[in-house]
Image: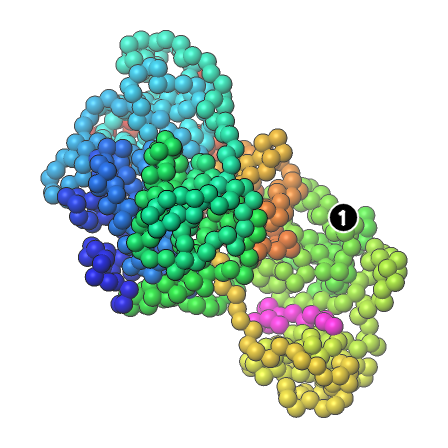
């Protein structure tokens, strides 16, 4: 392929051609590949280049490059890793985001590749077989911080290193102690237990004991005594604030231009605009805890190397090197965090520039046998049984009216409805509730619909799923449970009638005596809809079929871009709306004058094929709220294990979002959870133009429906575990070693957990 030049290190040839991780280490001033069995094992005296390649649901793959520098790595190796990372970016078409990683301060994205943790090893990496590379079995004290990815850091083996805020692991040759500070969170303790399991399996071949010590519990237990004896005997740990060291001071956001000589010139502060960034220049954005280098599309590799060196020098001079994340962005690849520091960032500035480079990589993927789709078919699979029982209520102020079965597939755009769908699950019947909000419904009816749905859900056994959907934004699952749906214009609720009367708006509620135009859509007889649209010719679209009713005359209009499947749905829908109609079938381009006159005359309408939008990949976020301050944090490389019982999470699928509520979270009301989902839509963290009408599902832990679990490699046994996160991890640790025997002594004051191998 053309994008590997003679200037690119030969070790990178073929890089990025397959999904997954590729790692190289600087050894004797050259790049050497790190074998897969050593991935996640980093030496503090070395520098590495890490490439993560992901196959997205649409289009070419996505690349992230990280260069990792150990605390004991020399400057030459570190600089070489930085240069090689930039060369790899160029080899991949300048379509990557690059991150500088410093030992002990790694980004969460980087750590997510190596779950449960990265524990650097003393010494220097050697590609020669049989080299022990400096590993020892000395007593080691580690801190573990983080609730979804864990920052593991070695601290001096001293009582003074302990505190009440963190979780510590004390590793000896024959035993591992877990010490939990009294102010540490349950989630952190649970993640630390994963690290204990990792150390036991990878450093002790499973042959060790594990003891769990709680801060402040001083009963006469041998494990407690043994733990403190390693520190020379027990002594109280000084009391400190639970928030000590966590306060952050807001720093001004400063934009610098980096000239060809690497000199920084400030050009703006705080109030920044996208127009300040020129294509032929490089810039540095100093945000305090994070620094970005933005490289214009028209800059050379030499200019980019100069800019990266200038940014690294800036961090060193200001003593920010070890505590500041440094990210390198090429024009067109800006992260949502970077864009958030600018007053305005054109939404139309999508990744066309990105695609120029990614198309080259896509070609390689195809050569390797991987399927790369530019416009994939939408996933229309139903993950639940769609032959269940459907109930529909119309909302009329504070009253609900149950709609007869024969009429429940007919909705009005000016009204709101509550839908209950009950279907057979694996062990029990499951219920799914929707509040459907018509596009022209009034705010009072919308609020009443949410209130009524929440009340019904709260009184229904089994923790059913509930969702808010708006007309024209319905998820596929909604259409599949109805199978056939007709949406009429207008409304019959008192609130809607009052609104149009007070506003002086003509009542266009469907009436067989009036002119009406229906767009027919869907994919099969189990998923078809007729939507009444404005009866004007601009409502037509060559990609659809239509039914036009004008008094006693009925036309069916067949767009030139429709398929035989669409024609079949047209016939079926015509029969459902009114089986007595005898339509006149016309094809696009051969319409009689009476057809156009019924639509008020012929005007322009969309005639090109309706393009499918790219299917976005999912993102998982954790909600945090402190004194009303709403925040979310993305969880990278997420798995089912990230659904922590103490948390409230949101799975962003772009077309719909799912708010997942853990059993031990502080959120006890589904309506509160729904409001969090709506707040998430307003925030639009990823700046992906999320509509405020995006469907929002609320799901309770232990009652996840298949159309949610399909986004994970789902293990039902994990979803049905009891206890908090720590207790669950303890139970999992117990169950993983089937070759061992266990003793668990749980008192009010402490846990003690021992593992003995059968070999002993």
* Quadrant for the C terminus in the image: top left
64 or 387: nearer the viewer: 64
Left or right for 184, reference 555: left
Q: How many labels, in total?
A: 1
Q: In the rendering, at what x and y percent does residue 555 appear?
A: 72, 84
Relative vertical location of residue 500 with respect to residue 190 in this rendering, above or below: below
Please provide the residue range marked out in magenta: 521-534
Q: Nearer the viewer, residue 338 or 285?
A: 285
Is 746 left, or right, of 394 in this rendering?
Answer: left
Task: Determine whether the residue tagged by mark 1 lies in a helix, strand or loop.
Answer: helix
Measured as percent of width and height from the top left, residue 672 is found at 65, 40
Quarter of the image for residue 666 reads: top right
Q: How far across and down, in percent of the image, does residue 160 sit?
A: 35, 15
Does the magenta-highlighted stretch encompass residue 532? yes
Q: Position of residue 656 (x, y in %)?
A: 57, 55
Going 73% across and 80% down the picture, which residue do you hit? Answer: 548
Q: Which residue is mark 1?
A: 448
Direction from residue 437 to residue 296 in the image, left or right: left
């Amino acid at each position: 392929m053309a994008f590997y030049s003679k200037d690119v290190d030969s070790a990178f040839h073929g890089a990025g051609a397959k999904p997954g991780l590729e790692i190289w280490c600087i050894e004797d001033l050259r790049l050497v590949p790190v074998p897969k069995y050593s991935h996640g094992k980093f030496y503090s005296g070395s520098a590495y280049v890490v490439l993560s390649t992901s196959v997205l649901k649409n289009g070419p793959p996505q690349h992230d490059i990280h260069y990792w520098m150990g605390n004991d790595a020399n400057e030459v190796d570190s600089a070489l890793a930085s240069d090689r990372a930039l060369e790899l970016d160029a080899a991949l078409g300048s379509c990557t985001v690059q991150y500088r990683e410093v030992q002990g301060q790694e980004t969460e994205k980087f750590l997510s590749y190596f779950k449960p943790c990265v524990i650097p090893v003393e010494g220097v990496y050697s590609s020669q077989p049989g080299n022990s590379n400096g590993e020892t079995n000395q007593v080691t004290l580690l801190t573990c911080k983080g609730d979804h990815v864990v920052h593991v850091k070695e601290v001096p083996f001293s009582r003074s290193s302990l505190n009440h805020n963190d979780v510590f692991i004390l590793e000896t040759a024959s035993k591992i102690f877990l010490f939990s500070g009294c102010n540490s969170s349950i989630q952190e303790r649970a993640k630390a237990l994963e690290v204990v399991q990792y150390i036991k399996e990878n450093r002790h071949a499973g042959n060790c004991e594990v003891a769990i010590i709680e801060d402040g519990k001083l009963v006469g237990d041998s494990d407690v005594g043994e733990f403190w004896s390693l520190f020379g005997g027990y002594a109280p740990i000084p009391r400190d604030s639970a928030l000590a060291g966590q306060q952050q001071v807001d720093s001004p956001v400063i934009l610098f231009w980096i000239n060809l000589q690497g000199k920084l010139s400030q050009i703006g502060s705080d109030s920044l605009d996208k127009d300040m960034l020129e294509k032929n220049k490089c810039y540095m954005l100093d945000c305090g805890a994070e620094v970005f280098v933005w490289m214009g599309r028209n800059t050379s590799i030499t200019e980019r190397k100069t800019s990266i060196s200038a940014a690294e020098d800036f961090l060193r001079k200001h003593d920010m090197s070890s505590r500041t994340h440094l990210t390198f962005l090429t024009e067109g690849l800006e992260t949502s965090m970077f864009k958030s520091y600018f007053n305005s960032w054109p939404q139309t500035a999508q990744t066309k520039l990105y695609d120029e480079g990614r198309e080259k990589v896509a070609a390689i993927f195809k050569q390797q046998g991987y399927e790369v789709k530019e416009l994939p078919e939408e996933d229309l699979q139903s993950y639940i049984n769609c032959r269940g029982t459907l109930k529909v209520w119309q909302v009329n102020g504070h009253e609900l009216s149950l709609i007869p079965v024969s009429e429940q597939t007919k909705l009005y755009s000016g009204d709101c409805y509550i839908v209950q769908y009950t279907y057979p699950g694996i062990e029990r019947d499951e219920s799914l509730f929707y509040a459907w909000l018509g596009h022209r419904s009034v705010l009072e009816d919308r609020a009443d619909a949410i209130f009524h749905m929440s009340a019904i859900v709260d009184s229904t056994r089994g923790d059913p799923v509930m969702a808010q959907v708006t007309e024209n934004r319905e998820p596929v699952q909604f259409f599949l449970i109805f199978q056939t749906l007709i949406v009429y214009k207008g409304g019959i609720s008192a609130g809607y009638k009052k609104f149009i009367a007070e506003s002086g708006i003509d009542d266009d509620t469907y009436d067989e005596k009036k002119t009406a135009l229906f767009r027919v859509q869907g994919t099969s007889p189990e998923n078809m809809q007729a939507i009444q649209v404005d009866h004007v010719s601009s409502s037509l679209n060559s990609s659809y079929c239509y039914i036009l009713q004008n008094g006693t005359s009925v036309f069916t209009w067949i767009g030139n871009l429709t398929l035989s499947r669409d024609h079949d749905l047209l016939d079926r829908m015509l029969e459902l709306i009114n089986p007595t109609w005898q339509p006149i079938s016309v094809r696009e381009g051969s319409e009689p004058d009476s057809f156009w006159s019924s639509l008020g005359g012929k005007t322009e309408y969309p005639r090109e094929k309706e393009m499918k939008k790219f299917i976005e990949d999912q993102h998982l976020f954790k909600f945090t709220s402190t004194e009303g301050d709403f925040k979310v944090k993305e969880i990278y490389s997420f798995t089912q294990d990230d659904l922590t019982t103490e948390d409230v999470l949101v799975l962003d699928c772009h077309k719909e979002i799912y708010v997942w509520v853990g059993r031990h979270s502080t959120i006890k009301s589904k309506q509160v959870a729904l409001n969090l989902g709506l707040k998430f839509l307003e925030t639009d963290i990823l700046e992906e133009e999320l509509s405020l009408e995006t469907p929002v599902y609320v799901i309770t832990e232990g009652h996840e429906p298949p159309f949610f679990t399909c986004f994970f490699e789902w293990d039902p046994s994990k979803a049905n575990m009891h206890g908090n996160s720590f207790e669950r991890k303890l139970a999992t640790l117990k169950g993983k070693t089937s070759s061992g025997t266990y003793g668990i002594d749980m008192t009010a004051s402490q846990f003690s957990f021992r593992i003995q191998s059968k070999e002993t």
